[in-house]
Amino acid sequence: MLLSGQGSISLSWHGKLWGVSFYDHGKSRASRNQSMKGCISDVQSLMDRESSLCRMTDSIEKIKQQLKYVHMTASPYDTAWVAMVPHPSSHQDPCFDHCLNWILQNQHENGSWENYNFGPSLLKDQLSSTLACVLALKKWSCGEEHIKKGVRFLVSNIGSIFDEQLTSPIGFNIIFPGMIKLAIEVGLKLPLGDTAVGEIFSLQKLELQSCWLERDEQIISDMSTSAMAFRLLRMNGYDISSDLLMKFEEASSFHDSMQGYLRDMRPVIEIYKASQTKLFLNEDVLNKINSWSSILLKEEISTKPISTKPISQEVKFALEFPFYANLDRLEHKRSIEQFNFGKIRILKTSHIPCSANEDVLKLAIGDFNNCQSIYRVELKDLNSWVKQCKLDQLQFARQKLTYCYLSGAATLFSPELSEARISWSKSGILTTVVDDFFDVGGSIEELESLVALFDKRDEKCRKEFYSEQVQIIYMAIHGYINELATKAFPLHNRDIKDHLVKIWLSLLRSMMTESRWQRNKSIPTMEEYMANGAVSFALGPIILPALYFVGPKITEEIIKHEEYDHMFRLVSTCGRLLNDVRGFGREGKEGKLNSVSLRILSSGNSLSIEEAEKDVKKSIEDIRTELLELVLKEGTTVPKPCKELFWKMYKILHLFYMNTDGFSSPKEMVSAVNAVIHDSLNV
């Protein structure tokens, strides 16, 4: 029985445990019933607490397991950028095709890609994600309907990017306009109108300029920071006035600083680099800064022996290779070799800036070595092409294959720019042969025959060649033009053969004019010489065809635009003047006139050689200023990657003609060839 014997004792014990007595005989039955109900309620509460505790324990364990394997929702924005990465062995295919498939499978009905449906407050994030996904699909030419729907969503909501009440992803005003610019460059049709596009680009400029224009104390008070900010903003197309560097226009700004007291030359190097980025002829502030900073740097290396310390090497490099004569790949090599991933920095105490530095260095080394292996294969193929075309059999011609390839590989260095590199190199080889043919290799009859072949473009005319030399040259150029036209057609959806022929014909005619001047001992005016010399310098067949292989679509409107022709004239004129300064002595002995000798003649021989060369160098500097302004100017007809190609050629010309006629010299550029193509990294 429950109420007698052991059962009674047991219940009594539990009653004491719970703080109640089940069988208090001194109380009435009603009182005992009330006590029992209270006890049952307490038991239920305890059981509920125990159940809740179990659930909490389970939740804690579940959270622990989840924290071990963190799961994040798919980000359309990040997925899109990963989807744009090309495959290492085939740049025509995506490296992560599953990311591309995710984009194709996860577009919303309204045409957007978004993480969550949190309403209009995250509209800017939706726009960024959608544009990134559309760019990825455009890059790999897939999902045409997805692109159309995405563009409709973008255009219908584009006004939201100006709404300051909406939540903005970090850096939105900088990144989104940059993505719009990329969309335009890759040929994505966004029906926004020039005014809307201009307003979008203005967001980016205002964001980046705000700190500078507001004279942020952290920027303008420090020479290195100010100089670097000025140079980076200006070289990326921002309208930054050099007046904001006015506080550094005197050398005392360095001598009176802590860096000056410590003789720390890093700020001087930075301000010297900034002083070279002139966009206008009357920037006196930059002229003054350039004057005192260059003097200090020269004193630094003249009063002390050049050591192996990085700062000494930086000073030497900055003076020897100004930014307009420094090829990208040579600078990359130097940066990798001087990179110290274990470098200790001393602030309040010692520390290593970044634990990932060693991995960064390994990645850079791997990339450089991979590119070198590609370059060597391309150089070998080019050598085979020269022999196949029989160009090596032309005894009069300089063999400049490696120099021609160096100029392409050192600037168009990315693996995916292989077609542009090959076009650049083959054109350089052919123009060198043609230049030598008109200078020393061909008779007047042979020269006229070659021009006629391109002038008439008549099949009957092609069946008979005046000489074997003419045949070799013509067939090499003719075959090369056909090759380029075939490769360019799927990229631009049009035949560019007529354009290429016009480029070559223009060159041949200008060389014919110079040949007649020399043979007839005619003296052209300076205007006649420069107008013809800009073309005869032979950059047309090198730069202009390569533009078809750097990314943007080149339309008829672009190649007929004044801006296109003007940049070509500027860089070609600069090349002609550089060549004239370095080749004055040699060409004088050969009975040739150039811009230096014509200046002297036009002055009635009152101008000295030194004065004439000084005038020419001043013209070169002015051209550089004008060309750089055009290259960096936003919202122009010629796409930015194409404009940058003109600037790359300008830098190549300065490197080749820095000390002498490096192109004609058999040894001057050998070290650069080896550094870019053959030599292993010294790390």
Image (cartoon, rainbow, N blue to C red):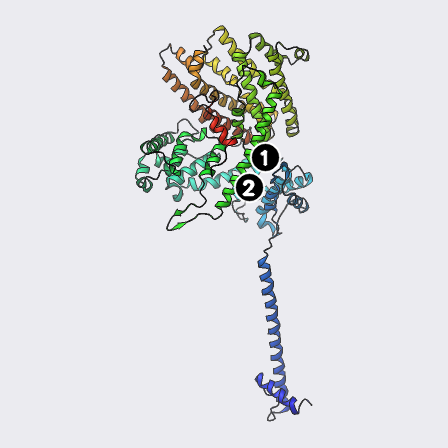
Left or right of residue 633: residue 126: right
The residue at the far top in this view is 520
| Total numbered labels placed on residues in the image | 2
Amino acid type indicated by mark 2:
Phe
- Is residue 632 visible from the viewing direction of this image? no
Q: Cβ–Cβ below 8 Å for labels 2 and 1?
A: no
Please state the horizontal and vertical placement of residue 427, each as a whole percent of the image: 57, 22
Label located before the other in sequence (2 or 1) = 2
Please state the horizontal and vertical placement of residue 558, each as a whole percent of the image: 58, 26
Left or right of residue 634: residue 555: right
- Circle 1: is it few (<14), some (14-19), or many (20+) Cα within 10 Å? some
Left or right of residue 474: residue 514: left
Spatial CA span between label 2 and label 1:
13 Å
Q: Is mark 1 on a helix, strand or loop?
A: helix
* Depth order, front residue of 628/267: 267
Please state the horizontal and vertical placement of residue 575, each as a whole percent of the image: 48, 21
Please state the horizontal and vertical placement of residue 38, each as a whole percent of the image: 61, 82
**What residue sits right under mark 1 in the picture?**
184
Amino acid type indicated by mark 1:
Ile
Give the number of the disc on residue 176.
2
- Circle 2: is it few (<14), some (14-19), or many (20+) Cα within 10 Å? many
Q: Quadrant of residue 285?
A: top left
Q: Quadrant of residue 507?
A: top right
- Is residue 355 visible from the viewing direction of this image? yes
Quarter containing the N terminus: bottom right
